[in-house]
């Protein structure tokens, strides 16, 4: 290797003067001995202002004390090395502006005196870029987390949808089999009762078949209503009718079921009688709420229907004294196919309430409920008296 | 007279099944839920038990568990009447000691044949 030599001090001076890095030479007692033009420019001082000044003039006030300590330490064991690796170093300009720097240190001896050399680079821009990069990274990381979350949610929705589908299939299979059983066994029995004197029994079984078929039709209608509701295909047909008569009709319709369970409905009505609404939809709402109340109450329990009708609003409360909805499951009551765990052994499609909710929404109304497990449930529907 | 205990919560199915069995000459005890069914089985010691699975109060699984654990009722032939046609449920029922099962919807003949077969099987032992 060829040794680099300079012919004279002029060579070193040129290196010093033209260097684009700030160079400071400091004596053992901490005074500035030499600075190059780049350092003058960086710190905003003139050469004369800095020479023989303590080096700490270039360091923010709060760090000066510490620096004195470090500087003294350096002279005990001088070595060419970067200063404070891994630490954010700060310097201060004449105008007080504090900025980040990177410093490497070296030393030499002159006439028996130890001198330290500091090479100072302003890293404001790099720091800013690092900051931006860090921010960008953090932003990216946030986005990744967000996307992952979205994907997980989409996946969960997909899984939920699939589960719903299989729940639907098994529910539908089960829900259809029971009325079909009634039909098939009644048909078998009609065949057995061929003689004239069994007319009464035949009639009973024909009625039973009709009622089972109605039950099947209701389940099917629920499926269809939900489908139509979800696609926004329901058209509201308003008519003026007598609400008391309407309730009587529904109670007549449910009489068979009521008798089977030996249950009783208490109906009380306050306020006006006439209402303008879609009667079919209202019937569907009432029918679902009432059959739930009956289904989820024991035999011989009562059901209270309380209706209030003023000039603007209709409110219907259906109260039962049945099994109630477990508190932790109440939030799921208006989800498709959802059934609380205490209904596992009671037949049902898990569609009635969601249909009611959607119909009520269609009327711009509200549905709320209060329930306590083992005590009973009250569903309250409020809708405008006159649909627009 | 042969005594049959029918445990079924659905009123129409309960009445129709009872009627079919009575017409065939059986004496039928009826329970509308699992708990009543368990008590009635212990009290009446019927010749055969027909039991639905999905019922409020105690379900069919609970009924068979309790009756098979009870010495007096453990040997009574037990038949599930079920709306579930899932193989694993049917197998689970047989594993718990059920002698047979009748899937819903069932025909008169299917019900009577199964009851007869189970009674016969029990006699040969």
Image (cartoon, coloured by chain):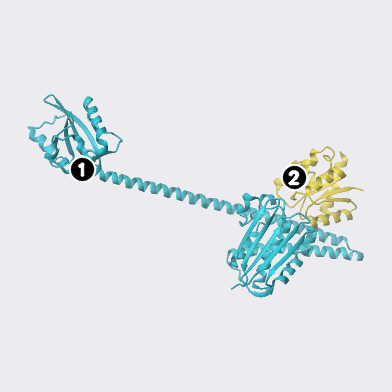
Chain colours: A cyan, B yellow
Q: Chain of mark 2?
A: B
Marker disc for residue B68: none
For discs 1 and 2, the disc positioned in front in the rendered view:
1
The residue that disc 1 covers is A93
| Residue A373 image offset from top left, x and y in percent | 68, 50
Q: Nearer the viewer, residue A338 or A48?
A: A48
Tell whether A82 sits left or right of B27: left
Label 2: few (<14), some or many (≥20) within 10 Å? some
Q: What residue is drawn where x is 80% and y is 44%? A: B99
Tell whether A167 sits left or right of B15: left
Q: Is residue A277 above or below residue A114?
A: below
Q: Quadrant of the C terminus of chain B?
A: top right
Q: Is residue A293 visible?
A: yes
Q: Chain of mark 1?
A: A
Q: Is residue A292 visible?
A: no
The residue that disc 2 covers is B61
Q: Secondary structure at mark 2?
A: helix
| Residue A149 image offset from top left, x and y in percent | 48, 49
Quadrant position of residue A8: top left
Q: Secondary structure at mark 1?
A: loop
Q: Nearer the viewer, residue B44 or A4?
A: B44
Q: What residue is drawn where x is 83% and y is 56%? A: B15
Between the C-alphas of marks 1 and 2, the distance is: 86 Å
Label 1: few (<14), some or many (≥20) within 10 Å? some
């Amino acid at each position: 290797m060829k040794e680099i030599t300079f012919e004279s001090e002029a060579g070193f001076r040129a290196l010093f003067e033209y260097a684009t890095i700030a160079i400071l030479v400091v004596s053992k007692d901490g005074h500035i001995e030499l600075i190059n033009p780049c350092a003058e420019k960086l710190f905003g001082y003139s050469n004369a202002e800095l020479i023989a000044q303590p080096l700490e003039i270039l360091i923010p006030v709060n760090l000066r004390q510490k620096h004195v300590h470090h500087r003294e330490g350096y002279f005990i064991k001088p070595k060419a090395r970067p200063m404070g690796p891994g630490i954010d170093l700060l310097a201060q300009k004449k105008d007080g502006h504090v900025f980040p720097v990177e410093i490497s240190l070296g030393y030499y001896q002159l006439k028996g005196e130890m001198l330290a050399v500091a090479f100072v680079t302003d890293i404001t821009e790099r720091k800013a870029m690092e900051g931006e990069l860090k921010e960008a990274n953090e932003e990216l990381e946030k986005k990744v987390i967000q996307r992952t979350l979205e994907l997980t949610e989409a996946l969960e929705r997909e899984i939920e949808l699939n589960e719903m589908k299989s729940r639907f299939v098994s529910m539908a299979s089960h829900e259809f089999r029971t009325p079909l059983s009634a039909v098939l066994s009644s048909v078998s029995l009609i065949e057995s009762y061929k003689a004239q004197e069994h007319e009464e029994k035949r009639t009973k079984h024909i009625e039973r078949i009709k009622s089972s078929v109605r039950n099947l039709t209701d389940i099917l209608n629920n499926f269809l209503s939900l489908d139509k509701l979800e696609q926004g295909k329901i058209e509201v047909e308003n008519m003026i009718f007598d609400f008391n008569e309407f309730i009587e009709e529904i109670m007549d319709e449910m009489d068979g079921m009521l008798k089977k369970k030996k249950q009783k409905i208490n109906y009380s009505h306050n306020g006006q009688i006439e209402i303008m609404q879609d009667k079919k939809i209202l019937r569907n709402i009432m029918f679902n709420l009432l059959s739930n109340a009956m289904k989820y109450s024991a035999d011989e329990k009562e059901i209270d229907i309380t209706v209030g009708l003023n000039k603007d609003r209709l409110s219907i409360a259906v109260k039962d004294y049945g099994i109630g909805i477990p508190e932790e499951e109440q939030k799921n009551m208006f989800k498709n196919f959802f059934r609380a765990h205490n209904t596992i052994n009671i037949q049902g499609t898990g569609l009635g309430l969601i249909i009611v909710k959607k119909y009520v929404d269609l009327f711009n109304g509200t549905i709320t409920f209060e329930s306590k497990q083992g005590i009973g449930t009250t569903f309250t529907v409020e809708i405008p008296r006159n649909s627009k | 007279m042969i005594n049959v205990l029918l445990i079924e919560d659905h009123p129409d199915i309960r009445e129709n099944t009872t009627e079919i069995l009575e017409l065939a000459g059986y004496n039928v005890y009826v329970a509308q839920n699992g708990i009543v069914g368990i008590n009635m089985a212990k009290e009446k010691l019927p010749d055969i038990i027909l039991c639905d699975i999905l019922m409020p109060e105690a379900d069919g699984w609970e009924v068979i568990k309790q009756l098979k654990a009870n010495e007096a009722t453990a040997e009574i032939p037990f038949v599930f009447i079920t709306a579930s046609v899932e193989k694993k449920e049917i197998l689970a029922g047989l594993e718990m000691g059920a002698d047979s099962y009748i899937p819903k919807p069932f025909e008169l003949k299917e019900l009577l044949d199964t009851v007869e077969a189970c009674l016969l099987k029990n006699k040969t032992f």
